[in-house]
Image (cartoon, rainbow, N blue to C red):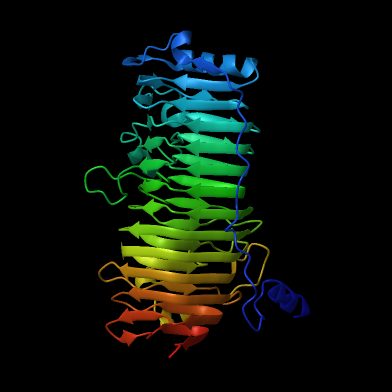
Amino acid sequence: MKLLRTLLATAGLFSAGLISLSHAADIKPDLPKIPDRTFSIRDHGAKGDGVTDDTAALQATIDAARTAGGGIVEVPAGDYLSGPLQLASNLNLHVASGATLTMLPLGKYPGGTERGEDFLSGSDLHDVALTGAGTIDGQGEPWWPFAKTPGARRPRMFKLSKCERVLVEGVTLKNSPMFHIAFSGMSHVTVRGVTVRAPASTDPVTPSHNTDACDVSGRTILVEHCDISVGDDDYTCGGDTHDVLIQHNTYGNGHGVSIGSYARNGVSNITVRDCTFTGTDCGIRIKSDRDRGGIVENLVYEDLKMTDVAEPILIYGAYMAKEREFRDLNKLTPEIAARYPAAPLAKLTPVYRNFTFRNITATAAKGRRAGLIWGLPEAPASNILFQNVAIIADLPFGIYNAENVRFENCTITTPDGVNKLSTAAAKVTVTMTP
């Protein structure tokens, strides 16, 4: 019992009040330093006619830049078909205006669905950039149905791991076979002014699956001024992610700004501000479960506008629940939530604490709830503050297994009235300033 109480105290579950939140508003990652010399892919034989396979010419240009100690690999106007490319340190792959870098189609792509080699990739690199006003086209439509085929592999468009000082700026990424940007174990990453497009996962004609726009895990991360609409997470990160600023972005289709489901080694100090969400499945989404969790803490969401969003705020720790009554979150009631069984607190238990939501307006999609915070019985979500939040929805905001949840000057409006919350095993206070 003493050990259990110590673990809970470490998780902040016996806190009497809100802890002062760290704010990631001043995140400024170091930018890559690229030598000022240019290598044109045309000089290495690239045709750019939309028919010729230019993989060898592109890789030869990258290799020449690597041998010279780095530089700018210029992709001029044209349509360049290519297979997988290995990037290098001290390298800026610049896709100029009028240029399209097109992934070879399924059937000609090396490895096909057996290996699914990533398109632009690298690991243990430093000072890497992908810039320009051009486009990278994944030709993903024939790949997307394989999301439901066990063992099939699909390429990620831009995959880096354990790299530092990385910049993605200005480019348009579209229709990746799988994730568009997939970075893990990173340090000092900037994603700025990027457009990402893929059909929604619910598109009646060409649904795209797992086409996440921007998956960036690591430390010191900035994502700003992006325009994103895809078939899965608009942004997401996993565990061991700290000090992230997401600002001035526009989100359309997709699962919103997400954390999880894997959160081993924790997630902390994330600020999301001045973003709009229109028609997203979720605005803010945090998900995990007992076999993949960690401490998720010190998150700030502010100055957000959401319109016709299926779930404006969704936070829960039972992501992998198998029983149907626990999986339909829109129909989750206090009675159903109370039946969810407790388990011993463990290293991978999801722990959610110290969240602030302020200056947020949202309208939920028809028939949807205003939001959901559903902690685990053994690890209630704790220290959650809402300030000046206005949500209009058909179903109430659910708060289950939570402690020290405060609504200050908020209006959660449903047909039942204003601030008629649905609660179970929750300590909630609602205050309005006259």
Closest to the observer, 96 or 215: 96
- The spot of residue 434 in percent (x, y) is 43, 91
Q: 376 above or below 276?
A: below
Residue at the far right in the pictured view: 2
Give me the residue at 60% from left, 27% from top.
34
For this orientation, the residue located farthest to the bottom is: 434
Residue 153, given in percent of the width and then of the height, sits at 45, 35
Can I make out residue 309 in this image? Answer: no
Residue 29 placement (x, y as % from top left): 61, 45
151 with respect to 189 (left or right):
left
Q: Count all numbered tags in the image, as a single digit.
A: 0
Residue at left offset 37%, top offset 58%: 276
Q: Is residue 246 left or right of residue 139?
A: right
68, above or below 103, in the image: above
Along the line of sight, which residue is nearer the eye, 155 or 66?
Answer: 66
The x, y position of residue 60, in whole percent, is 53, 13
Q: Does 432 sit above or below residue 161?
A: below
Query: What is the quadrant of residue 112 in the picture?
Result: top left
Which of the 4 image quadrants contains residue 311? bottom left
Furthest toward the left, the residue is 205
Work out whether residue 237 or residue 61 is closer to the camera in this orientation and state it: 61
Q: Quadrant of the N terminus?
A: bottom right
Residue sitting at x 50%, y 46%:
215
Above or below: residue 425 compared with residue 385: below
Residue 60 appears in the rendering: yes
